[in-house]
Image (cartoon, rainbow, N blue to C red):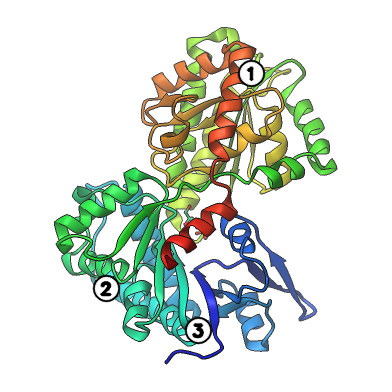
């Protein structure tokens, strides 16, 4: 049933713009997050009647829902913790993320067994909870933009509940090509495509991912039918980044980073979540190969690697995090000297320190195996002080827009990545500055606010 007073614009995502921490004294502490969707949504203004539907993720979030505490414009769904764990960890992050990023070691995985079927039914329950909440909250004819692979079934489910709505979905990940997508059980791939095709319009970050989706539809669903498909390459938020990167806390961190690196040395910087697709281990191997190939760089360069914990509920992520640490330690033990630490690895998330590293980087290393976009590749050139050479994987979505002025690499080839690092380190300063200027222009072509408005306009047109 359409609500007469409901929201005119709704977004739905697993992770919302706010999270709650339950303190020992029983008080709830709210923390607001950032990101493209937060600034995108702010573009339509506080009076636009917007509502963000998200899931409670922690005990603090669930307690906030139960106490009726919440932020205006946000509705958090109290999905049972076990259902959420199966849907988020079991299906979204261990199956759909792996399929779209092509991460399986296929001789042994995936195995679609009874346990998978049980988790899939939780994924359906979780998607249904979102569809029902959106159906209950949306005004007649409202626009709904659903985010990501967590909620792939929502458009189809919502369509059956509310035929009057304009339903969009945006994928922040790559989409798998048909040869990989067909690995899923037939009924599951059919259900996923049917869910997505319940939308009026689907958005992707690059043409490559949009084409992969269309190819899957052609092969497994008889084509995309009436669903329109668009590309919106989310860009960096230049105004926010430049202002934030010049605050005192960033300045302070630049001073301590410079001390850690050592005066006069060059810095190869990477900043990532410790995410399997980010390829941090091969980045370290490439750096080690650089030190073998060009011993003249020893003592002269430092690899500053920020690898912030992510999805630590999953064993494979914990193992990967440990391998990053082990390899960094090994490189430092084998190559380090009393005056030089070749790898400076930080795992404690610190946004101000990330911006400090962006500003002083001589080279940025962004070498994912496969990535929807990769905003680090877009943010570094925007805030870089002296210009920064960008070594960029051709498998990152950002390569579609930045490829011309970056040094492109095959992320699996650590020898060519080592050569690219050397070329980046030796790039003449004037060329580096020129390329950085062009990279920054491409990176900011579609700021988050415009990115969101474009989707909304295309959906409601
Ligand atoms: O990068 C794709 C993406 O789905 C983002 O949209 C989202 O912010 C993130 O991955 C999900 O990460 P997490 O599992 O930590 O919520």
Q: Secondary structure at mark 2?
A: helix
Q: For the point 46% across and 72% down, which residue is it?
A: 144
* Front-lying residue, 232 or 123: 232
Residue at label 3? 139
Q: Which of these two is toward me, 165 or 186? A: 165
Question: Height in image: 452 above or below 441?
Answer: below
Q: Is residue 394 above or below residue 418?
A: below
Mark 1 and mark 3 in contact? Answer it, CB < 8 Å. Answer: no
Disc 3 Cβ-to-ligand 1 distance below 8 Å:
no
Give the mark nearest the N terminus, 1 or 3.
3
148 sits to left or right of 271: left
Q: Position of residue 345 (x, y in %)?
A: 63, 36
N-terminal-most mark, 2 or 1: 2
Please provide percent x and percent y for residue 175: 33, 52
- Residue 298 visible to an observer of this rendering: no
Looking at the rendered image, the quarter that the N terminus falls into is bottom left
Q: Which mark is residue 301?
A: 1
- Mark 3 vs mark 2: in front: 3
Quarter holding residue 37: bottom right
How far is the residue under mark 2 from the one under mark 1?
50 Å
Mark 3: which secondary structure?
Answer: strand
Q: Which mark is residue 117?
A: 2
Q: Residue at x 24, y 72 (%)?
A: 114
Q: Quadrant of residue 428?
A: top right
Residue 409, percent across and down?
41, 26
Q: In which quadrant is the C terminus drawn? A: bottom left
Residue 283's disc is: none
Quarter of image, res 5: bottom right
């Amino acid at each position: 049933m359409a609500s007469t007073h409901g929201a005119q614009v709704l977004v739905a995502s697993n992770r919302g713009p706010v999270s709650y921490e339950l303190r020992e004294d029983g008080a709830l502490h709210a923390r607001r997050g950032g990101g493209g969707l937060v600034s995108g949504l702010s573009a339509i203004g506080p009076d636009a009647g917007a509502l963000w539907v998200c899931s409670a993720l922690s005990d603090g979030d669930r307690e906030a829902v139960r106490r009726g505490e919440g932020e205006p414009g946000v509705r958090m769904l109290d999905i049972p913790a076990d259902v959420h764990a199966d849907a988020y960890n079991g299906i979204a992050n261990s199956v759909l993320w792996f399929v779209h990023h092509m991460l399986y070691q296929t001789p042994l995985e995936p195995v679609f067994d009874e346990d998978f079927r049980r988790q899939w039914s939780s994924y359906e329950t979780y998607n249904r909870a979102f569809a029902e909440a959106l159906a209950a909250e949306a005004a007649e004819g409202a626009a709904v933009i659903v985010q990501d692979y967590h909620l792939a079934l929502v458009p189809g489910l919502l369509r059956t509940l509310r035929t009057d709505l304009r339903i969009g979905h945006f994928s922040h990940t790559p989409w798998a090509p048909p040869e990989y997508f067909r690995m899923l059980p037939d009924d599951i791939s059919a259900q996923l495509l049917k869910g997505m095709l319940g939308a009026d319009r689907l958005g992707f970050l690059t043409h490559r991912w949009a084409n992969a989706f269309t190819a899957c539809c052609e092969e497994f669903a008889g084509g995309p039918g009436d669903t329109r498909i668009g590309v919106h390459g989310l860009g960096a938020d230049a105004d926010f980044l430049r202002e934030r990167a010049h605050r005192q806390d960033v300045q302070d961190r630049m001073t301590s980073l410079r001390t850690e690196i050592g005066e006069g040395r060059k810095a190869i910087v990477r900043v990532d979540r410790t995410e399997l697709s980010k390829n941090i281990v091969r980045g370290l191997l490439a750096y080690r190969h650089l030190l073998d190939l060009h011993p003249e760089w020893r003592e002269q360069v430092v690899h500053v690697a920020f690898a912030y914990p992510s999805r630590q509920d999953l064993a494979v992520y914990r193992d990967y995090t440990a391998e990053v640490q082990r390899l960094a330690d090994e490189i430092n033990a084998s190559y380090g000297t009393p005056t030089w630490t070749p790898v400076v690895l930080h795992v404690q998330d610190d946004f101000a320190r990330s911006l400090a590293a962006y500003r002083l980087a001589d080279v940025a290393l962004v070498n994912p195996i496969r990535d929807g976009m990769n905003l680090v590749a877009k943010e570094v050139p925007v805030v870089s002080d002296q210009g920064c050479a960008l070594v960029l994987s051709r498998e990152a979505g950002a390569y579609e827009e930045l490829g011309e002025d970056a040094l492109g690499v095959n992320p699996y080839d650590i020898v060519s990545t080592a050569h690219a690092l050397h070329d980046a380190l030796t790039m003449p300063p004037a060329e580096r500055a020129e390329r950085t200027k062009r990279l920054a222009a491409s990176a900011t072509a579609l700021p988050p606010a415009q990115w969101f408005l474009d989707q909304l306009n295309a959906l409601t047109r």
